[in-house]
Image (cartoon, rainbow, N blue to C red):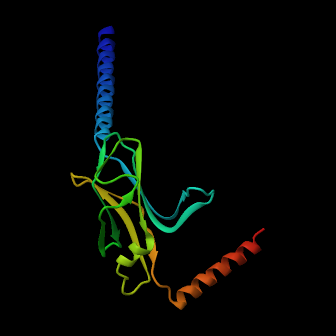
């Protein structure tokens, strides 16, 4: 009688041990695989740059800059070789040759390290051909390494010369938002 229970208990113990071993093996392989991948985050934004001037307390401010912040959030070193912009979904791209930034390309970006690049927004906007039917175009930054790994940023919208109709829409939208703010308690 006890032989049946001993066989049943040993079979269940073996099954639990096999399942636990397989789960631990899977989790360790997944962790190893994730450590072997590059994880790069790029943030593209239109911003102001300010830096101190010698002899004064006022900073020098340069408006309308397009900044690219690149962060290595993985465990492997990543070599930033090229930097560029994707223009729309079907329009193409714009390669940025010798970008201005905190470092020079090619640059080895170590884990938990960041670097930044920037360019004048108006000059970059001047290099982009205006779309035929719209006054706006979405752009995003990309970076790649020697192996061809490409990482992309968020999309931002570039507005070209506004027509009178666009200006009226913006004006009416601000009036509506102000009216809503006045009505709400």
Residue 50 in the image, given as x and y percentages of width and height: 54, 60
Between 54 and 87, which is closer to the camera in this rendering? 54
Position of 151 with respect to 112 (left or right) is: left
Q: Does any portion of residue 84 appear in the rendered image? A: yes
Residue at 55% of width from left, 62% of height from top? 60
In this view, 35 is above or below 52: above
Q: Quadrant of the C terminus?
A: bottom right
Looking at the rendering, which quadrant does residue 67 occupy?
Answer: bottom left
Above-or-below relation of 95 to 5: below
Q: Residue furthest front?
A: 55
Q: Residue furthest left?
A: 147
Residue at the spot 29% in from the left edge and 10% down from the top edge: 3
Residue 90 place in picture, x, y as percent: 30, 74
**Foreground pick, 68 / 22:** 68
Q: Residue at x 44, y 71 (%)?
A: 121
Along the line of sight, the residue nearer the viewer: 147 or 169? 147
Q: Is residue 29 left or right of residue 165?
A: left
């Amino acid at each position: 009688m006890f032989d049946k229970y001993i066989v049943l208990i040993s079979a269940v113990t073996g099954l639990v041990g096999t399942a636990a071993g397989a789960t631990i093996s899977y989790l360790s392989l997944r962790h190893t695989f994730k450590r072997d991948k590059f994880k790069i985050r790029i943030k593209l934004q239109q911003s102001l740059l300010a830096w101190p001037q010698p002899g004064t307390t006022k900073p020098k401010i340069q408006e309308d800059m397009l900044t690219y912040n690149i962060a290595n959030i993985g465990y492997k070193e990543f070599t930033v070789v090229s930097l560029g912009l994707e223009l729309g979904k079907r329009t193409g791209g714009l390669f940025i040759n010798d970008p201005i930034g905190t470092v020079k390309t090619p640059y080895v970006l170590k884990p938990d390290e960041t670097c930044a690049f920037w360019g004048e927004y108006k000059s970059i906007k001047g290099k982009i051909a205006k779309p035929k039917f719209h006054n706006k175009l979405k752009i995003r930054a990309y970076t790649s390494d020697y192996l061809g790994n490409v990482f992309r940023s968020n999309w931002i919208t570039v507005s070209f010369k506004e027509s009178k109709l666009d200006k009226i829409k913006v004006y009416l939208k601000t009036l509506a938002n102000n009216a809503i703010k006045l009505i709400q308690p």
